Image (cartoon, rainbow, N blue to C red):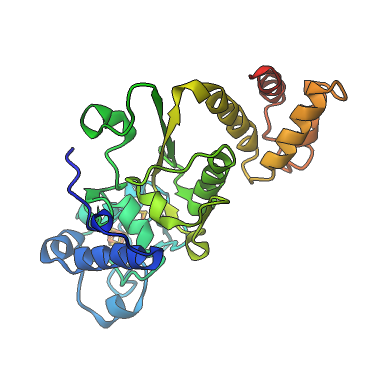
Amino acid sequence: MTVRKSKLFSRQLSRREAIRIIIRSSTIAAASPSIVALAGCSSSVETETITHRYIDQDVCIGCGECVSLCPMGAISLAETSSIDPDECAECGVCSRSRVCPVNAIQQGNLKWPRVLREVFSNPLAEHETTGVQGRGTPGIKANDSEKRYQHGQIGVFVEMGRPVLGTRFYDVEKVVQLFTTYGYAPVKENPVHELISDHARGLLVKEILNEKVISCVLEFVIPQRESGSLLKIAEELTLVTMCGHGLISVNRIRRLTSQIREGHISAKEAANDIAAPCVCGIVNMARAESTFNKLVNAV
Ligand code: SF4
Ligand code: SF4
């Protein structure tokens, strides 16, 4: 895929300007006749005032055709169907599929920061910052054409959310933070780069954190001579993400790793420690123990 030269990077823009461009891009997409036609969107007053995709309860006949289409499981059916706006990632699949026999699925009037859901989840929406549709990047895997990393560098591609679960920027921020502690930031060509508000700490713009998207790709370039850091990041990420509720902190992981290294505790005790706050018991103890052992032995 060819990346059109981004307006954003043709001159220095502030973060605020960049975010406004993302919003404008989505607003234009929403207003485009072709997209509106695909979405089956009406120009009703509700469309103007409701700020998320929804099902017009006065129109829906409860046939249930739309329910199984939603990749986020956000549509449920009682007498009529409805969309849970918190779970909806604004991908537009339910609208574009045209399964609704009565045209009850309405696009809504997306505003900031919700508009980010569409920009990252709808493959027809283009990131104005990068000129690429969908997730806003062709991905570091397309390095043959993109040349993001060169000889002596490692291209790292972290995809979050796909398949099935989706991801929120809270979780994206955790990964950015972890890489930041090792001195790595998402490449500037990646759309997340413009959403970082504090580069020293790897924090994203606060108001976007709860926004849910189907998929978000992070890309980093790491010098090959620092491959040891990459292995540590991978093991730390493995441990941090073992609790589905995000209750394991990376600082805790590092402290426990030091304690194992100094002979104060075993890897098994460290695994027990991180499992303690996990209320759903999902932490895989054997995997946690072996991951701690790998971390301790990492250079
Ligand atoms: S826009 Fe996408 S995520 Fe939202 S209800 Fe429709 S199919 Fe589901
Ligand atoms: S396809 Fe249309 S009519 Fe059928 S349940 Fe979904 S919104 Fe209602």
The residue under the point 28% across, 66% down is 107
Tally the marks.
Answer: 0
- The quadrant in which residue 277 appears is top right
Q: Residue at x 27, y 39 (%)?
A: 138
Position of the N terminus, as image quadrant, is: top left
Identify the residue shown where x is 54% and y is 39%.
Answer: 183
Left or right position of 297 against 68: right
Identify which residue, 42 or 287, lies in the foreground: 287
**Left or right: 16, with 22 as reference point:** right
Q: Could you say which is closer to the camera, residue 157 or residue 223? A: 223
Q: Is residue 38 above or below residue 153?
A: below
Decide: is 253 above or below 192.
Answer: above
List the single residue furthest toward the right. Answer: 264
Tell me: residue 65, above or below residue 37. Answer: above
Residue at the spot 27% in from the left edge and 71% down from the top edge: 59
The reply to whether residue 102 is in sight is no
User: Left or right: where does residue 219 sit relative to residue 59?
Assistant: right
| x, y percent for residue 274 | 75, 35
Residue 185 seen in the current view: yes
Q: Residue furthest bottom?
A: 45
Q: Left or right of 299: which side holds 185?
A: left
Q: Quadrant of the C terminus?
A: top right
* Residue 253 location (% of width, % of height): 71, 35
In percent of width and height, residue 28 lies at 20, 67
- Seen from the viewer's position, the closer of residues 268 and 102 is 268
Q: Quadrant of residue 254?
A: top right
The picture quadrant for ligand 1 comes to: bottom left
